[in-house]
Image (cartoon, rainbow, N blue to C red):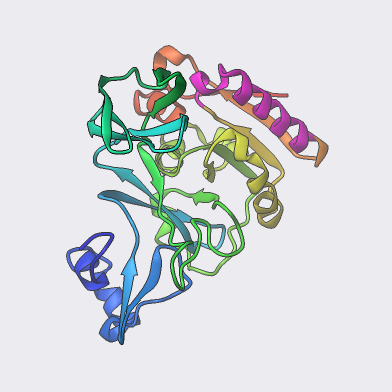
Amino acid sequence: MWGGGKIGDNIKDLPIAPEMGRRYPRGKYPLGCVTFYEMKKGQLSLRLMAGFPGIMIPFRNQYNQIVGWQVRVDEVKNSVHVKSGPTGIQAELLQQPNIVKITKNGDCIYEGKLEIGKNKELLIGGEKVVVKIHKGQKYLWISSANKNEGTGAGGSENPLPVHVAVPSSHLKHWKSGTLHKTKSVMITEGPMKADLIADLLPQRLNKEEIAKVGTTVLAIPGVNAWRIVMPVLKDMGVENVYLAFDADLVENEKVRAALIAFATELKKEGYNVIIAAWNPAQGKGLDDAMQASFKPVFRTI
C-alpha cells in the first residue's frame, strides 16, 4: 500500500522491483534513506515508505545518486486553516476545492464556499475569526523526517536537494558514485523540466553552441533556494552558468530580487553568468519553447 503498507507492495509492479529484491532481500529495506522509515507496534517492526499518490520524480546529485524525491500528485488538494480566533474554533474542508465548515466547540457556525487564497472574517460572539483556504501544491516532497529512522527530503546533509540532469543517452553510461565534471551548466526550476531541456539541447543547438552551453542542466526547488546550488557548482568545476527560469516567475518582485541576488553572487564568485532568453509566446518555460522547435538566445551579463 502506497504511503502506509509494505514496501514490497509499493514497488512490486515497478521496474526497480528486481533490483530492490536483490539489494534488500526479505524486506530488509534501508533506514536513514529518503522516504524510508520504521514503524514499531509491540514486537512488530515494519519498514515503510512515505509518500502520496502520484508520479515519483527522483533528484540525482552530481555523483548520479538519488538524494531526494518529489511526487507530482494525481490530485491537487487545498487545505483550510484557522489563522486567528477564540479557543474551540475549527475548520474543515468538506469538499474540494473550497466548501468549508467552521465550528466552535463542535457547533457549526458557518458552512459554505470561501474564496481561495483570501482571508474569511467572521464575528462570533463579538470575537473575530479569520479562516483561509490555501491552494494545494502539484509537487510535494517525500520526507520521513519526523518518523523513526527517517530522514528529510534532501537527506541528512542538505535541507533540499539539487537535481543534476544530463541527456538520457549520457545517463545510462554515468556510473553511480562518479563525479560529473563540466565547465558549463544551465540552471532552471524543477527536475522534470531540467531532464527535458537536457535531452532537447543536443537537438536544438548546433555543435558550436553545444561546445559553449554544454548539456548539463541543474534544477533547484525555486529561485529563492539558489544558495543550495553554490557548493554543487564548485564541486563540478563549473565556469559558465546559464540561467533559464520561466518569464512569469521573474515577473514576481520577490523572485526577481532573488534572481538578481543569485546572479550577483555568481559574478562575485567568478562565474561567467549568461541569461537564456526566449519569447514567452513560444512557451512559458524553456522546455515548452524547445519542444515547439525554438531555441533560446544567450546574453552575457
Q: Is residue 27 above or below residue 115?
A: below
Task: Give x and y (percent) for residue 161.
Answer: 54, 53
**Magenta part, dominant SS:** helix
Q: Residue at left 41%, top 12%? A: 281
Asked whether 41 or 269 is in front, the reply is 41
Q: Among all residues in the image, which is located at the extreme left?
A: 13
Place of residue 146 in the rendered image (x, y in percent of width and height, measured from the top left): 47, 62
Residue 259 appears anywhere in the view: yes
Outermost residue, front direction? 125
Does the magenta segment cover residue 256? Answer: yes
Between residue 229 and residue 125, name the one nearer to us.
Answer: 125
Please state if 2 lies on the left or on the right of 153 as rendered: left
Bounds of the magenta segment: 246-267
Check the picture and name the quadrant holding the C terminus: top right
Q: Quadrant of the N terminus?
A: bottom left
| Residue 170 position (above or below residue 300) | below
Task: Name the residue at 57% across, 58% down.
Answer: 62
